[in-house]
Amino acid sequence: MQPCRLAASDLACRRGDRVLFRGLSFALAGGEALHIAGANGIGKSSLLRILAGLLRPWAGSVTRAGEVGLIDEHPALDPHLPLGQSLNFWQRIDGPTDNEAVLLGLGELLDVPVRYLSTGQRKRAALARLVGQAAPLWLLDEPLNGLDTAAIATVERLIAAHCAAGGIALIASHQPLAVPGLARIELGQFAA
Amino acid sequence: MSALPTLLRRDLALLIGGRRGGVVMPLLFFLSVAMLYPFGVGPDAPLLARTGGGVIWVAALLAAILPLDRLVAPDLEQGFFDQWALRGIAEEMVIAVRMLAHWLTFGPTLMLAALPAAALLGIEGATLRTVELGLLAGTPGLAAIGVMIAALTASLRGGAALAGLLLIPLAVPLLVFGAGSLATGGESGLALCAAISLALVAVTPFAGGAAIRAAREG
C-alpha cells in the first residue's frame, strides 16, 4: 500500500449560519484508525466531506497524502442496473480486483437491480466498491447503518485488515466499533 | 484517462437503454410535431414547404429538451460526482463525455428522422440539404446547451421545469442562423450556426464543471 497521511489542523466547519465545530486538530499516519463520535447533526458527515476535499473548511486546513475512499449515504450505484453491473462500472475505473462482492456476502445478489436491495445490502455493496478501489485513506460515514451483526463483524474485520496493511481508517459513527487500536474523538467537545 | 471509454459507455447505456424512453421518445416527439404541423396550418403545399424547415428546427430544439432532467441530476444525487472527484476524474471531463453521449443519442437520429419529416412537409432538394447540414451544425450546440443547463439546475428543486425555460433563450442564436439559412439560402448562416455550436461545445465542460462544484458546496 502506498504511504499515506491525514492531518487536520484547527479545522472549523460552518453550515448555513451555524458553526458546527471549531479548533479540531489531529494527525493520522499509516496503520492508524480513528473513531469520530458524536450526536446527530454535530457535523460528522461534513467533517468527512471536508477531509475528503469535497467541502471547503470554514477555517483551518487538511493535509492529505494518498487516494481517498469514501462511504457515505449515497452508494453511487445505478439503481436500475443489476448489482453486478453497477459494481463492474467501478471495477473498470478502479482496476480489476478479487471478488470483494463475494467477500461481503453479495454473491447471490449480483443479478438483483440495486433499487430492490435493502439498506444493509446497499451499504455492503458500497463497502465492496470501497474495497475494490484499494485506496489507502478510508473515510467511512456511518458504515454500520442498517447492517446485521454478522456484517458488522465483517466490516470491523475489513477495517482491522486495512489498517494492518498500512492504511488509514477514519470512521464517523454513533455506534460503538470493535477495532484494535482505535482512537476516539468526541466531536461534541469541539462544538462551537 | 482510461476512465473515459468507461464513462462514455455508461452514459450511452443510461441514455439509450435505461431510464424513461431513451432514444425513441425524442424521435417520436420530433416526428409527431412534423406530422401535426400540416394539420394545424392546412394543406397549402407552398406554405408548408416554405415554413417546414423552421418547424423541423423547433421540433429538434424541443426534442433536445426531453431528457434534460436525467442528464446530470441523478448522478449528483446518487454521489457519482463525489466518487469521481475522489478518483481524480475532473467534473469537466465527465461533462464533456456526457455532452458527447447526449448528442450521439439525439443528433444522428434527428438527422435521419428529418428525412420522413421533410417528406411530410413537402421539403425537397436543396432545401432538404440545407436542413440536414443545419442540423449537423446546430445539434452539437443544442446538446451543449442541454448539458450546461442540466448541470446548472441539477441541485435546484423544480430544476426540470426551470431547465426547459432557460434553454430556450440560449438556443435562439442557433435557431436564428440554423433556420435562417433556409430563408437566405446562403452558406453563411450554416457557418455561423456551426461557429456558435463550437463555442458552446467549448464552454460547456467548464461551465458545467463549475456548476457541479458549486452544487457540492451548497
Image (cartoon, helix red, strand yellow):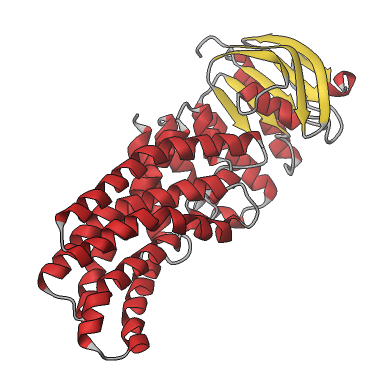
Numbered-mark total: 0
Give the quadrant of residue A31. Answer: top right
Relative to A151, is A188 on the left or the right? right
Q: Residue at x 60, y 39 (%)?
A: B215
Q: Residue at x 72, y 42 (%)?
A: A147
The answer to whether residue A98 is seen in the rendering is no
Relative to B174, is A17 on the left or the right? right
Name the spot of residue B120 as percent of width and height, x first.
23, 82
Name the spot of residue A74 as percent of width and height, x first.
63, 42
Residue that lies at the very extreme toward the front in this rendered image: B184
Name the spot of residue A89 as percent of width and height, x first.
44, 42
Q: In this view, does A31 lie above or below A139?
A: above
Relative to B127, is B25 on the left or the right? right
Q: In this view, does A75 lie above or below A112?
A: above
Of residues A19 and A106, the one nearer the viewer is A19
Of residues A121 and B10, the one nearer the viewer is B10
Relative to B76, is B37 on the left or the right? left
The answer to whether residue A146 is seen in the rendering is yes
Residue that lies at the very extreme toward the left in this rendered image: B125
Give the quadrant of residue A72. Answer: top right
Of residues A51 and A102, the one nearer the viewer is A51
Image quadrant holding the C terminus of chain A, namely: top right
Of residues A88 and B163, the one nearer the viewer is B163
Q: Which residue is drawn at 41% across and 38% down?
A: B205
Name the spot of residue A78 as percent of width and height, x first.
52, 50
